[in-house]
Image (cartoon, helix red, strand yellow):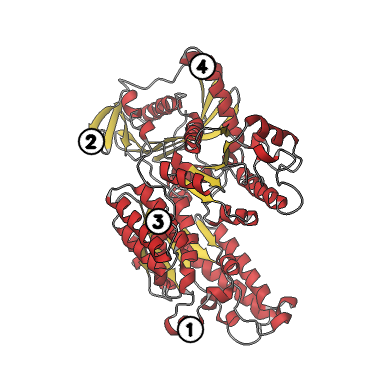
């Protein structure tokens, strides 16, 4: 590897900026997008101003391998000033964002009229960015708080209007929509008395936000954007530009547009399946203070007093990520026996060995450790986030594995939690039972891999697993998981088409659609919903739209059972063919031969492009593997099996 390390050179600030810009440009020129994005992330960290945002927007517009994503702004103010920031932050997340801006104040007309620009734009995400003063002028203007009766009327009127707008929007399209909630007024006419009154403005803001949350919860794929929390974190004095608010209807300070865009992009990333799956952490000066090999178990900083309590707090934050479905792993240069002693004996350890699904503790390079972790978990390196305090180690990972997201922890351990959460690498828009059990599911997988290693032939391994596969229609209970799988599954995904809950719900009402979840149980436990099939009944065929499988159960022939099931359905519906499509991506190599391996004939395309495949279900049906027990619910959407 002759590439220079991805680190910021010391010296004059202008020289640093020029160097980073050159690195971004040269990586773009050679089409090394992972490295280009890493350089761009560093540039944004070092120089987050408007000049950098404009530069990265131009870079993004010249990058043709980004994930395309269309964002429509419906706003009550001049939100177009955020376009540069949104496109720039999209770029450093691998997303090529196109933007539609309605005129400020026209958000109602855009949602109501079926021929408006937002519907013609066909967005992947709609952002309803409305300032509180534009929803409820009486709450934000000068003067006393509205009376209790007026407040009740304001709340009722707002909730009714929002519900009606969202209802009209959802009737016309299934695009996810994100709605700003209410930030606190910048001035309180009653001063310190306001918070002490039941009819104070702050109390009304809380009630309006509650009403907004309830209203969004009743509409599929309508989400709340915590604008109030964002303004609070940044401070309202920093957030707003009083002059530009009056002069150009642009209330947000230019220096804050990057923070706003970074929050927006978390939604874009979640909807494009680019949220990360695994956090890999160092140990020394990361999970505890000090160097274990030098300080010993009793000498490391981990305890009730500073700085030890900062490391305890960081461990608890990491454990919270595990509880919401993030995989945890360790990559440390250390003596394994010493580390075992810390986990076994130190009373302030908030994390246990069982919290980690992969552990690499040795003296090999950390980039090799990350490669092993990805192989062990059967996920891509671009699913990893690596956290370490050592600048040299971070620079090496950026250089050797530029697709890995790197969190270089600051010298102050009390800032670790902020660094862990600020970019939202693991943020998603749903939380399923599989997420809750993810660590346990990977432990089950490790047991099955140990069984595989102990068997001399693959068929005996399959039979010893005692696998049962259940095919069931997508229901209200499984709808969220089904949408989540289309958004997050990348490797074994034939078409990588992303769908939200509203889109799948529409198909649930159409009897021509076959919408099926796949659950696998083996001798080590229930793996949960691991597969998804969506297929449309045509005149003479069953046409597969979505065919995907979790990486946890790849190489167990579950896909064969899924195709056999599709043959059964096609025959029962009187169709002669099952048709499938392969849309190649950088990540879905494991699925590209699935139809060829099962006797389908290629009818269009080649290995390097989109291809179409067809199987005659009466002449050459795919048989179920003999080692599976097969179950299918009799209430299957559109067919009984």
Label located before the other in sequence (1 or 3): 3
Residue pictured at 39% horizontal, 66% vertical:
14
Label 2 with label 3: CB-CB less than 8 Å:
no
Disc 2 versus disc 4: distance between alpha carbons?
A: 36 Å
Instruction: Read off the residue under disc 3.
Output: 40
Disc 3 versus disc 4: distance between alpha carbons?
A: 47 Å
Residue 122 versus residue 545 in the image, above or below? below
Question: Whole-percent x and y of residue 460?
Answer: 50, 13
**Is residue 134 visible to the viewer in this orientation of the structure?**
yes
Marks 4, 1: nearer the viewer: 1
Residue pictured at 36% horizontal, 34% vertical:
589
Label located before the other in sequence (2 or 4): 4
Question: Whole-percent x and y of residue 388?
Answer: 55, 46
Name the element at disc 2. loop
Label 4 with label 1: CB-CB less than 8 Å:
no
Marks 2, 3: nearer the viewer: 3
Quick one: quadrant of the N terminus?
Answer: top left
Disc ID at residue 38? none
Instruction: Read off the residue under disc 4.
Output: 461
Residue pictured at 67% horizontal, 33% vertical:
338
**Is residue 124 visible to the viewer in this orientation of the structure?**
no
Between 474 and 457, the one nearer to me in the picture: 457
Marks 1, 3: nearer the viewer: 3
Between 276 and 610, the one nearer to me in the picture: 276
Instruction: Read off the residue under disc 2.
Output: 605
Instruction: Read off the residue under disc 1.
Output: 243
State left or right for residue 90 relative to residue 263. left
Question: Whole-percent x and y of residue 89?
Answer: 42, 59
Q: Residue furthest top?
A: 456
Disc 4 versus disc 1: distance between alpha carbons?
A: 71 Å
């Amino acid at each position: 590897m002759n590439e220079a390390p991805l680190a910021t050179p010391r010296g004059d600030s202008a020289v640093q900026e020029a160097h980073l810009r050159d690195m971004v440009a040269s990586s773009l020129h050679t089409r090394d997008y992972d490295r280009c994005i890493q350089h761009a992330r560093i540039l944004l960290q070092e120089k987050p101003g408007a000049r950098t945002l404009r530069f990265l927007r131009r870079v993004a517009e010249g990058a043709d391998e980004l994930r395309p994503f269309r964002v429509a702004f419906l706003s009550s103010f001049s939100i177009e000033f955020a376009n540069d920031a949104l496109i720039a932050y999209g770029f450093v997340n691998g997303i090529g964002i196109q933007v539609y801006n309605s005129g400020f104040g026209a958000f109602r007309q855009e949602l109501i009229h079926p021929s408006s620009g937002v519907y013609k734009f066909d967005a992947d995400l709609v952002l309803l960015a409305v300032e509180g003063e534009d929803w409820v002028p009486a709450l934000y203007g000068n003067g006393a708080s509205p009376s209790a009766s007026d407040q009740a009327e304001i709340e009722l009127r707002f909730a009714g209007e929002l519900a009606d707008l969202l209802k009209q929007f959802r009737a016309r399209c299934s695009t996810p929509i994100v709605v700003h909630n209410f930030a606190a007024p910048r001035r309180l006419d009653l001063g310190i008395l306001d918070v002490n009154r039941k009819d104070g403005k702050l109390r009304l803001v809380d009630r309006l936000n509650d009403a907004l949350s309830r209203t969004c919860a009743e509409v599929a794929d309508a989400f709340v954007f915590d604008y109030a929390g964002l303004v609070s974190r940044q401070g309202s004095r920093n957030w707003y530009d009083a002059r530009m608010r009056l002069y150009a209807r642009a209330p947000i300070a230019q220096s804050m547009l990057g923070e706003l865009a970074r929050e927006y992009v978390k939604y874009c990333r979640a909807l494009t399946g680019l949220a990360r799956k695994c956090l890999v952490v160092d140990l020394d000066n990361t999970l505890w203070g000090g160097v274990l090999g030098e300080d010993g178990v009793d000498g490391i900083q981990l305890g009730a007093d500073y700085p030890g309590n900062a490391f305890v707090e960081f461990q608890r934050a990491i454990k919270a990520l595990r509880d919401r479905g993030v995989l945890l792993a360790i990559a440390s240069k250390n003596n394994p026996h010493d580390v075992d002693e810390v986990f076994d004996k130190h009373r302030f350890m908030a994390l246990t060995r069982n919290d980690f699904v992969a552990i690499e503790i040795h003296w090999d390079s950390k980039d090799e450790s990350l490669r092993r972790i990805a192989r062990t978990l059967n996920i891509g390196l671009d699913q990893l986030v690596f956290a370490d305090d050592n600048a040299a180690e971070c620079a090496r990972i950026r250089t050797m594995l530029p697709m890995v997201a790197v969190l270089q922890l600051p010298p102050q351990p009390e800032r670790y939690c902020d660094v862990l959460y600020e970019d939202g690498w693991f943020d998603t828009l749903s939380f399923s039972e599989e997420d809750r059990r993810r660590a346990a599911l990977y432990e089950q997988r490790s047991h099955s891999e140990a069984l595989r290693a102990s068997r001399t032939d693959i068929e005996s391994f399959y039979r010893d697993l005692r696998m049962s596969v259940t095919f069931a229609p997508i229901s209200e209970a499984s709808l969220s998981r089904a949408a989540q799988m289309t958004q997050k599954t990348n490797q074994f995904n034939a078409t990588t088409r992303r769908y939200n809950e509203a889109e799948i719900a529409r198909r649930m009402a159409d009897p021509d659609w076959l919408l099926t979840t796949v659950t696998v149980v083996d001798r080590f436990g229930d793996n949960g919903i691991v597969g998804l099939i969506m297929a449309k009944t045509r005149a003479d065929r069953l046409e597969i739209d979505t065919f995907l499988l979790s990486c946890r159960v790849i190489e167990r022939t579950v896909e064969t059972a899924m195709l056999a099931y599709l043959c059964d359905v096609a025959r029962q519906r009187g169709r002669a063919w099952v048709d499938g499509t392969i849309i190649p991506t950088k990540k879905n190599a494991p699925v590209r031969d699935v139809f060829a391996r099962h006797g389908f004939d290629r009818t269009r395309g080649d290995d390097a492009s989109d291809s179409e495949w067809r199987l005659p279900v009466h002449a050459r049906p795919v048989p179920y593997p003999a080692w599976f027990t097969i179950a299918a619910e009799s209430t299957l959407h559109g067919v009984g099996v």
